[in-house]
Image: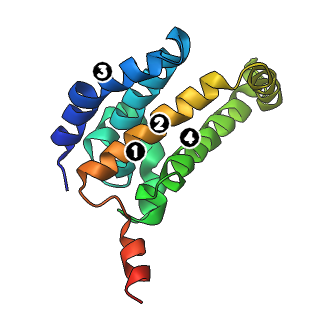
Amino acid sequence: MASGKQHDNATCFWCLPFCLFLSLIAGLANGLIGGLAFAIGGLWLSPDLDTRSKALKRWGPFKGLWWPYRKLIPHRSLFSHGPLIGTGLRLVYLMSWTALLLMLLQPFGFPTLVSVTKVFKEQVGLNLQPILSLLLGLEASAWLHLILDRDPLPAEWHRWRHR
């Protein structure tokens, strides 16, 4: 498995410039969204958030948000390192915290969860490309992580194969 420094170097210096170049073919705005999502996915939303990793430390005072995730998700499991599943679960986890925060702040004049959801649906209905760029950038960073770990399959997959 690669170290945190190796993951960071691969994300920032090897693949991010290449990812930005390729995603710019899709257009400037979508390329920047995809490249930024790739960097965020590699540096802050890493599959290693279930351990005491560099990605977890980058959350600073908000790293406590990941405590339940770290307790519930075993390291290198299908739910942390599984292609599509791991990224999806981390996104749902973050959206759950965001929804909770919006509900708590609603009495203080912040937008309601319903109004934020309505605006999001209107924007997605107009153009799916930015959302796809974001999701592809996040998932590409997760795949880079898995490839650097030299075993892109979560531990459960090996157990199932040998049954």
Q: Residue furthest top?
A: 28
- The alpha-carbon separation of the residues under discs 4 and 2 comes to 13 Å
Residue 87 picture location, percent across and down: 50, 47
| Above-or-below relation of 35 to 3 | above
Given this view, does label 3 or label 4 mark the residue nearer the observer? 3
Q: Which residue is mark 2?
A: 138
Q: Point out the residue furthest to the bottom here.
A: 163
Q: Is residue 113 left or right of residue 29?
A: right
Q: Secondary structure at mark 2?
A: helix
Instruction: For marks 3 and 2, give the one nearer the viewer.
Output: 3
The residue tagged 1 is 142
* Earlier-in-chain disc, 3 versus 4: 3
Within 10 Å of disc 1 (Cα), the crowding (few <14, some 14-19, many 20+) is many
Looking at the picture, which amino acid does disc 1 mark?
Answer: Ala
Q: CA distance from mark 3 to mark 2?
A: 15 Å
Report if the CB atoms under discs 1 and 2 are less than 8 Å apart. Answer: yes
The residue depicted at 20 percent of the width and 43 percent of the height is 4
Near-viewer residue (110 or 14): 14
Residue at 41 percent of width and 30 percent of height: 38
Secondary element under disc 3, as helix, strand or loop, is helix
Judge whether residue 52 can be spotted in this image.
Answer: no
Mark 3, Cα crowd under 10 Å, few <14 / some 14-19 / many 20+, is few
Label 1 or label 3, whichever lies nearer to me, is: 3
The amino acid pointed to by label 4 is Leu
Tag shown at residue 94:
4
